[in-house]
Amino acid sequence: MSELARSSDATQLLAPIDFYFDLGSPYAYLGSELIDTLGARYRRQVNWHVFLLGAAFKHTGAAPLTQQALKGSYALHDFARSAGFHDIPFRQPTRFPVSTVHAARAFCWLSAQDPLLARGFAHAIFRAYFTADRDIDNIDTVLDIAQSQGVARSSLAEALGSVALKDSLRLEVDRAIARGVFGAPFFILDGEAFWGVDRLPQLTRRLDGEAF
Amino acid sequence: MSELARSSDATQLLAPIDFYFDLGSPYAYLGSELIDTLGARYRRQVNWHVFLLGAAFKHTGAAPLTQQALKGSYALHDFARSAGFHDIPFRQPTRFPVSTVHAARAFCWLSAQDPLLARGFAHAIFRAYFTADRDIDNIDTVLDIAQSQGVARSSLAEALGSVALKDSLRLEVDRAIARGVFGAPFFILDGEAFWGVDRLPQLTRRLDGEAF
């Protein structure tokens, strides 16, 4: 058996990393820029799952960080600092937080057809919001960004108006919450949950197979 | 000037790291086991400040992690995992969270007399709670632990009953909140805030003087 075939077999055997994100979360954006490289290094597929932080917050009673007393100004500083720490471009959006429901539905729709295209779209949405201050809550902006990624605009526009797609996203969000996802980014590796981009060092050590 | 004198002068010039903790916070416990080594490596004095998370939570609307839906079981797992990650002994206390008001007052009282003794007492309280499952909310346990550190038990017992000491702690907590402290551990370095043991890598990079 060749080295290549052996490494390909190994990839088949390892369970994927599940990556949960809300398209409006700055820490999820940082996670989105880091997780695929990490997965590739350890030959783990990364399955991207969109959800809505607002729905999770209804369960936990949490509120957006920037709307909390004391934490708000710290959070704004920490978003930018954490981006700098990971050497990822970042600009705080003028309007924050915003609804990501249209973008999330678009991701769901694309994901069912072509996960790689969906991932490219998610990157484009994250970067549009967190580096170019675009209004990702606006349905036309979502369509523009999807089109720039090679998505058929009219088909997506039609899908975004459908009840079926609304139900699909709701189901995705319910599934995420049922798995215990309450924040973003959220990673699940071999049944173990890791919340936050600041847990990537722990996730990495697990991937190294080190007991700790 | 000798090398020793020069390094001693340098120590004088650098501002201290302020370290804020609640004696019942598992992440603050981890921070307490790490921060002095970090400070020493960079010739920064570390000033230990006790506060009460409950008082900060009244401002932020936060609740103890283990009492939050979805987050609770994750938090319990993460406490132990994070301790393992840093190679620090940890055992989840049977009763959690508990009031740390007596222990915090004792720290205040000791701190005013002998900051090093106060630090030793804080270590002893953290370790009693997070490795030996002792009831640190019990005033006799607090006195036992203080006595084991060489503190005059009867003097501390008397102080713990005084209005002056209650006022001292209240002032400390108010000061912490006025500086924006809302969680534990919380570090302030040259006016910049770092929340969480998971921000130590960012704090370290700042100490390295690297821009990011």
Image (cartoon, coloured by chain):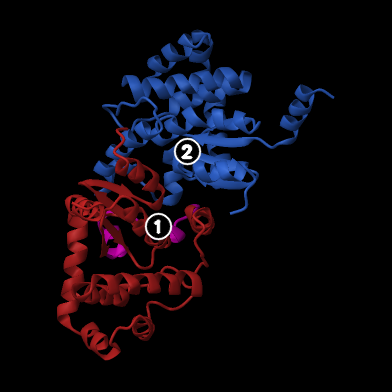
Chain colours: A blue, B red
> Percent position (x, y) of residue A193?
56, 47
Q: Are marks 1 and 2 in contact (CB under 8 Å)?
A: no
Instruction: Determine the residue located farthest toward the bottom in the rendered image.
Output: B154
Q: Quadrant of residue A19?
A: top right
Residue at (50% x, 41% y) in the render: A200
Visible residue check, residue B94: no
- The amino acid sitting under disc 1 is Leu
Label annotation for residue B34:
1
Label 2 amino acid? Pro
Which quarter shows the C terminus of chain B?
top left
Asked whether, in this view, residue A84 is left or right of residue A206, the answer is: left
The answer to whether residue B26 is above or below residue A5 is: below
Q: Alpha-carbon neighbours of circle 2 within 10 Å: few (<14), some, or many (≥20)?
A: many
Tell me the CA gap for discs 1 and 2: 26 Å
Position of residue B56 in the picture relative to residue A178 (left or right): left
Give the residue drawn at x 40%, y 31%.
A24
The residue mark sitting in front, 1 or 2, is 1
Of B155 and A119, which appears nearest the observer?
Answer: B155
Task: Identify the residue at horizontal 42%, vertical 45% (top origin).
Answer: A57
Instruction: Give above or below for A32 relative to B160.
Output: above
In the rendered image of this protein, does residue A107 appear above or below residue B27?
above
What is the x, y in percent for residue B149?
Answer: 35, 80
Of residues B169 and A63, the one drawn nearer to the viewer in this rendering: B169
State the mark number for residue A185: 2
For image coordinates 62% across by 52% down, the residue present is A211
- B25 lies left or right of A186: left
Residue sitting nearer the eye, A201 or B2: B2
Percent of width and height locating residue B8: 22, 55
Instruction: Using the rendered view, name the quadrant where residue A91 is placed.
Output: top left
Q: Mark 2, chain letter?
A: A
The segment highlighted magenta reads B51-70
Q: Which element is circle 2 on?
A: loop
